[in-house]
């Protein structure tokens, strides 16, 4: 469920016409619905009740401060994978006591910063990381709160680039070593062993992989308790998929069904729980607005060349991901559809938002909305081809606020310097144009 609907022939974000946003901000531009964010959070929180649980939003999905602050106001914590995300979460009002630090490549500086902040948990993913974290904490007279992220070697049945629970993945402690590593952690100087963490992938479309992984985690948790290393906290990660509107693809399970599964698997187990939804909360809370620049017809192909590209939304190029694309002006009832390639201006053949997509008649100047773009859209945007980063706006009822401006290429050039080589004749200039 989201708050992007046609009204009187116009696609609206809550009570704001998307044409109004495009006129004010230009295109391409990301638009988020506050009401949708709030609704999705509440639906998920209700689904996992009455478990003693913390919802730690996966910041990597969309780290805009307005998004984080909206979720923080509802009581969300944060799952971060860098010091930058840690700082963003705290700046948005999420206390360190509700922040979990995941990721396979935490640096010394990042671990020290997180220790000083007093985060609730490090999800440790390798024995080498244990050694570094334990040494850094002990040297400061601290104990790092740790959950061991285990890799249960479960097929998540999702795209190979976002599957994280197979033994070939870089994530987590391999299952054969998990028990031994956990027992050692429970006795380690500088470590306060909290429990277990697991995350098998993103955009999962059925519950069976979750069930397989969660049952293994419960068995391990019970075994560790008997061995003298009680599991006080179980972090079950995220990964529940969202509907992207792809024809013929069944919708993923509802959060309520996911919640029932968790309660069934962990019935009677005395632990706190952590959940790390990302895409589930923000994916369908955002759209990317783009304008048609040209229509081009070649033998057997029709192209709608738009002003958004893989620089703004890389998911179709990177994951072959499907995003519904709809005109902002509602097409006439019964409008004939024809296959069309919706492509961007970036100088790459792979720069396509959709291929062979059935679309109504379009013309230059038409405004399109790329749906389900709130997760891994702006967060993964780049300035490839020296394109500016798109602005982001958030809608709340009848109003909208620019929550990040368009970041133009000249701002980046101002940070660059042309070297002044002593063996070169004549004056050189910095990128800002100052001779030295």
Image (cartoon, rainbow, N blue to C red):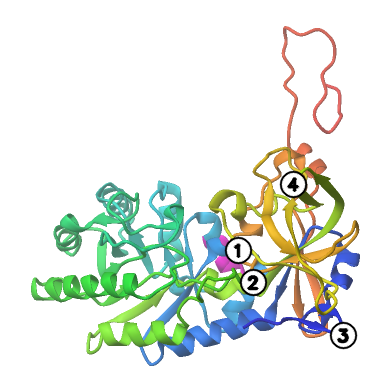
Q: Dot 2 corresponds to which residue?
A: 67
For disc 4, the neighbor class at 10 Å (few under 14, some 14 to 19, many from 20) is few
Mark 2 vs mark 3, foreground winner is 3
Residue at horizontal 85%, vertical 73%? 329
Q: Secondary structure at mark 1?
A: loop
Q: Secondary structure at mark 4?
A: loop
The residue closer to the viewer here, 416 or 436, is 416
Q: Secondary structure at mark 3?
A: loop
Residue at horizontal 45%, vertical 79%? 253
Q: Are marks 1 and 2 in contact (CB under 8 Å)?
A: yes
| Res. 5 image quadrant | bottom right
- Find the distance from the CA under tag 4 to the CA under tag 1: 41 Å
Residue at horizontal 48%, vertical 72%? 277
- At which x and y percent is residue 343? 74, 50
- At which x and y percent is residue 339? 72, 58
- Find the distance from the CA under tag 2 to the CA under tag 3: 29 Å
Counting residues from the start of the chain, the first of labels 2 and 3 encountered is: 3
| Res. 248 image quadrant | bottom right
Number of marks: 4
Q: Secondary structure at mark 2?
A: helix
Quadrant the C terminus occupies? top right
| Position above or below: 35 against 111 | below
Tell which residue pokes out farthest to the left in this image: 227
Q: Are marks 4 and 1 in contact (CB under 8 Å)?
A: no
- Find the distance from the CA under tag 1 to the CA under tag 2: 7 Å
Range shown magenta: 86-92
Counting residues from the start of the chain, the first of labels 4 and 2 encountered is: 2
Q: Dot 1 corresponds to which residue?
A: 63
| Position above or below: 412 against 306 | above
Would residue 93 be visible to someone looking at this image? Answer: no
Q: Which mark is residue 8?
A: 3
């Amino acid at each position: 469920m989201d708050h992007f609907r046609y009204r009187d022939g116009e696609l609206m974000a809550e009570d704001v016409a998307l044409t109004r946003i495009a006129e004010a901000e230009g295109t391409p531009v990301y638009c988020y619905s506050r009401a949708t964010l709030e609704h999705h959070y509440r639906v998920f929180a209700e689904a996992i009740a009455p478990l003693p649980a913390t919802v730690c939003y996966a910041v990597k999905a969309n780290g805009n401060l307005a998004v984080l602050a909206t979720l923080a106001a509802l009581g969300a914590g944060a799952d971060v994978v860098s010091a930058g995300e840690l700082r963003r979460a705290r700046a948005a009002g999420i206390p360190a006591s509700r922040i979990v630090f995941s990721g396979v490549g935490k640096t010394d500086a990042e671990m020290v910063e997180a220790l000083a902040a007093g985060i609730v948990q490090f999800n440790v993913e390798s024995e080498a990381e244990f050694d570094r974290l334990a040494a850094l904490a002990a040297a400061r007279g601290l104990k790092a709160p740790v959950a061991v992220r285990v890799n249960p070697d479960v097929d998540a049945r999702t795209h190979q680039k976002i599957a994280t629970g197979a033994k070939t993945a870089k994530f987590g402690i391999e299952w054969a070593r998990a028990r031994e590593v956990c027992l050692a952690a429970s006795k380690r100087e500088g470590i306060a062993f909290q429990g277990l963490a697991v995350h098998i992938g993103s955009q999962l479309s059925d519950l069976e992989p979750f069930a397989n992984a969660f049952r293994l985690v419960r068995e391990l948790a019970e075994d560790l308790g008997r061995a003298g290393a009680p599991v006080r906290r179980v972090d079950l990660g995220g990964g529940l998929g969202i509907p992207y509107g792809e024809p013929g693809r069944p919708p993923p399970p509802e959060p309520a069904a996911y919640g029932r599964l968790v309660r069934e698997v962990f019935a009677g187990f005395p632990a706190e729980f952590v959940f790390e939804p990302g895409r589930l909360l923000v994916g369908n809370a955002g759209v990317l607005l783009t304008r048609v620049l040209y229509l081009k017809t070649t033998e057997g192909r029709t192209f709608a060349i738009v002003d958004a590209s893989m620089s703004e939304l890389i998911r179709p190029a990177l994951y072959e991901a499907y995003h519904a694309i709809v005109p902002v002006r509602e097409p006439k009832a019964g409008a004939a559809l024809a296959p069309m390639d919706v492509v961007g201006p970036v100088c790459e053949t792979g720069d396509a938002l959709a291929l062979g997509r059935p679309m109504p008649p379009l013309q230059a100047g038409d405004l399109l909305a790329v749906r389900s773009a709130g997760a891994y859209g702006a967060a993964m945007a780049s300035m490839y081809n020296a394109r500016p980063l798109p602005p982001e706006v958030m809608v709340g009822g009848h109003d909208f606020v620019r929550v990040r401006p368009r970041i133009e290429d000249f701002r980046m050039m101002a940070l660059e310097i042309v070297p002044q080589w002593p063996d070169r004749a004549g004056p050189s200039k910095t990128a800002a144009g100052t001779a030295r």
